[in-house]
Amino acid sequence: MHFLMGTAVSAVNTATDATNHADTAWILASSALVLLMTPGLAFFYGGMVRGKNVLGMLAQNYVTMGTVSVLWILGVYSLAFQGSNGLIGNLKNFGLNHIWMEPTGLSLTIPPMVFVAFQLMFAIITPALITGGTADRLKFGSWVAFSSLWLILVYAPVAHWVFSPAGWLAKKGAEDFAGGTVVHANAGAAALAVILVIGKRKGWPKERMRPHNVPYVLLGAGLLWFGWFGFNAGSALSANTLSAYAFVNTNTATGAALLGWIITEKFRDGHSTTLGAASGAVAGLVAITPACGFVSPVGSIVIGLAAGAVCCLATGLKNIFKFDDALDVVGVHLVGGILGALLIGLFGTAMVNGANGVFYKGGWTLMGHQALAVVAVVAYSFVVTYILAFILEKTVGLRVSEEDEAAGLDLSQHAETAYESATFSDGSRFLSNFTSNN
Amino acid sequence: MKLITAIIKPFKLDDVKNALNAFGITGMTVSEAMGFGRTRGHTEVYRGAEYTIDLIPKIRLEVVVDSADAEKVIDVIVKAASTGAIGDGKVWSVPVDHIVRVRTGERGVDAI
């Protein structure tokens, strides 16, 4: 967020007198855009799993919209944004009491309640991102417990460190416009930790587990791209030139990353795929997230191309190191988030906002701040998530039984199935008529 | 009596069904099937991971006919199911010893 540099916005607290209605309208609209990203993510992931697990995936994402929406009001917002301690906030805004108070260190042109709504949507999608790595094998109830505790133990402190001006990483000068470290590297590291605790899906990597509905993946990617304008351009917390830069940079990098991914796979595998186009777009969105308010549009092209190519290749890491990152949360979000955060150190320019990077005669200082933020966030997220997942796995059990995994999450966790049996070319149904009611 | 079994491409089902109706058969059974012949399957790539798809979807169509009609029915199916491309399928027949219409208890050719 641009205010993290402490330069773009005066620290003088002018409270509600400074409310700007245009800014308020844009951030309210952005909040709705960001909310839509989670259903988008659910379909992006849902299309990639097998048909017996699609409802399980959708359910894990939607329930996160439920739990985080409640927990955010009951203290988590306050832990992230209220209080001057560098490591964690306080509970002054528990229940959104005293919400006339601005978040610590910020001088907003929008009511604090609007900031609460906007930041809530980030807090929803961040744990939801983890579900792609752990796909097909988490118990529904255990996911609810895990994601709720993770929000409090990992998301709230990390958001405080980076997004709150009071946070220790923000004070060090680390730049993260919309959440490359807080959202993507954080969720990616957490996904890796949970994957290592629960192990691989039965049959992986020998058994084929191809995406059951690639059109869903493309639909989800489109919703993500659309919603991401709120995520990134909204993070200017204002409707101004900076938000326009963030908007254009986001779109530019995403387009470039789409191309970067499908060019890479064309050379590697012989075809450019639709799944690759969707994946490349998301990789670009991830990588430009931290950088969109600090780099030029030409810088965005380079960041996007790099993200598309690097993330495409990074999805192969799981096959080399044998961790079953089912839908490539590590390859896309961890790698893409880190890449974007570090490339600010090269492409950051004060002509847009923030500090100058290596290519703008700023030297390596900014890169040092970025590297510190990446290491701190990834290390904290991985360690705390690993411990949390380990405790839950040993107590309530995170992973479904072998029988439930074979049956699929849709049936075993929710007593539903997504589809009737396959249809004939004329659309008539066949095997579904054999289901009985006991 | 003969049981004729045809493995055909799914999109050819309507053509074969219409051709058999035109010929005058009195019933058929259709099921979804998976399999491969000399064509084998094909390869798909998702995020760089190659999947060899051995079993490809087919339609299995079964008809019981009077032995005298068997050759002609087989010809009708082959003609309607053919695209000339690989993977068009197979048709075969086997003898049937008994056939009973459940509702009336009729047996043999009367039950077809």
Image (cartoon, rainbow, N blue to C red):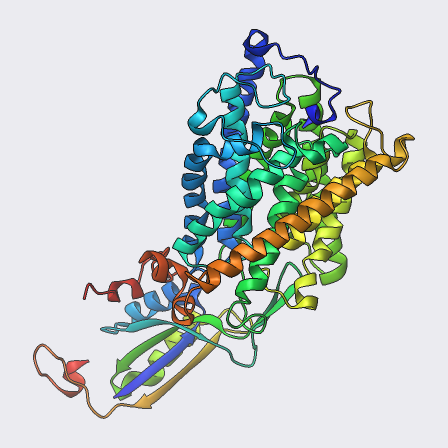
Looking at the image, residue A108 lies above or below residue A217:
above
Q: Is residue A166 above or below residue A337?
A: above
Between A228 and A133, which is closer to the camera in this rendering? A133
Up-down: is A31 above or below A145? above
Residue under the point 42% across and 64% down: A400
Q: In this image, A3 relative to A419: left or right?
A: right
Looking at the picture, tell me which residue is in the foreground, A406 or A399.
A399
Q: Residue at x 73, y 34 (%)?
A: A291
Residue that appears at 34% across and 72% down = B31
Residue at (43, 35) in percent of width and height: A69
Q: Residue furthest left?
A: B104
How far across and how far down the image is residue A174, in percent?
Answer: 75, 34
Q: Is residue A239 left or right of residue A409?
A: right
Residue A325 figure quarter: bottom right
Splitting the image into 4 quarters, where does residue A356 fall? top right
Q: Is residue A252 left or right of residue B107?
A: right
**Image coords of residue A293 (percent x, y):** 72, 28
A154 displayed left or right of B77? right
Q: On screen, B5 above or below A182?
A: below
